[in-house]
Image (cartoon, grey):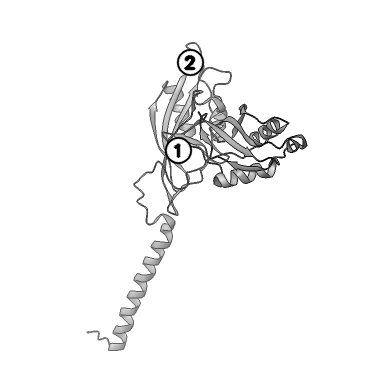
Amino acid sequence: MQFRFSPARLLYTVLFFCLLQSLVFTVQAQTSGSTLPIDSSKVYIAVDKMPEYPGGLKAMYQYIQIGFHYPEELRKDSVSGTTIFTFVVSPTGKTLVIDKLKGLHPLIDGQIIQLLNNMPRWQPGEKDGHLVPVKFTVPVKIGPPQPALKAEEVYEEKVYIATERPPVFPGGNEALLKFIRKNFKASSEYKTKGIEGAIVIATILGIDGTIRKKDTQLLKGLGYGTDESMLEVVNNLPAFTPSYQNNVPVLHKITLVIRLDEYGKVTSVLPPVQGRPN
């Protein structure tokens, strides 16, 4: 028996298969999501928006501190030092591909690897509007209890004055000026003196970008109550984007030069100087 197609039926058949192919392509494109144009095999170390652990880097180290238990077998020898691991935050926020750059002991290294593997999902990194895999390097200082790990002392107390990616105030220098203007109030005594000048304050940003109040110093003041007021404003600045060196967040010293006019109004704030100006 031979089947014969009329021209109309043949046309409908062709249109049906074209429509089916179009639907398959559409479903594939939709399931790929925003990562479709990105080569998933490429891992980035710096992107437009870096991945973020829930609660920030300080919360990540607190997670490690709580989860890590110093091995009883190592107490006698007091094994201590800094381990260094790298891992990739995938476009889904999952930590993958963990690699040990520097270990201390299998009993310690194994725990750290397990903790990194089981971390809560991160907010993924973005490049050109797409979610991409990003590589992180994490040093962890280990020592006998108590406590075995210290979230604020994960890094050596090295303070940088220049890094590959310096800290940035949220919104930039214009937002920094706006914040200081809004929160600083000059004393009545200062306003009667008819003087103008600059207040210079140095401080250190923690690995999470927050001001370390214990390290805030007045380098140059104007007196008449203005210095104390400005120190309080600086100590309450919102967190900066942390400073990074070799893709690792580090402590960073900045210096703020804040100018006042004779009426006590903040006229300008120089972009935070890395370290102390000459």
The quadrant of the rendering that contains the N terminus is: bottom left
Q: Secondary structure at mark 2?
A: helix
Q: Give the residue number, with chain letter if any, for mark 1.
A: 165
| x and y, in percent, of residue 135 in the image | 41, 39
Q: Give the residue number, with chain letter if any, for mark 2.
A: 74
Q: Decide: is 156 above or below 239.
A: above
**Callout 1 environment at 10 Å: few (<14), some (14 to 19), or many (20+)?**
some
Drawn side of residue 32 relative to residue 229, left or right: left
| x and y, in percent, of residue 113 in the image | 44, 31
Q: Residue at x 47, y 47 (%)?
A: 49
**Disc 1 residue type?**
Arg
Q: Residue at x 36, y 49 (%)?
A: 40
Query: Which residue is the extreme one toward the front?
Result: 194
**Callout 2 environment at 10 Å: few (<14), some (14 to 19), or many (20+)?**
some
Q: Residue at x 54, y 37 (%)?
A: 272
Report which quarter residue 60 is drawn in.
Answer: top right
| x and y, in percent, of residue 152 in the image | 56, 27
Drawn side of residue 63 relative to residue 261, left or right: left
Q: How many marks?
A: 2
Drawn side of residue 204 relative to residue 18, left or right: right
| x and y, in percent, of residue 11 in the image | 30, 84
N-term-proximal mark, 1 vs 2 = 2
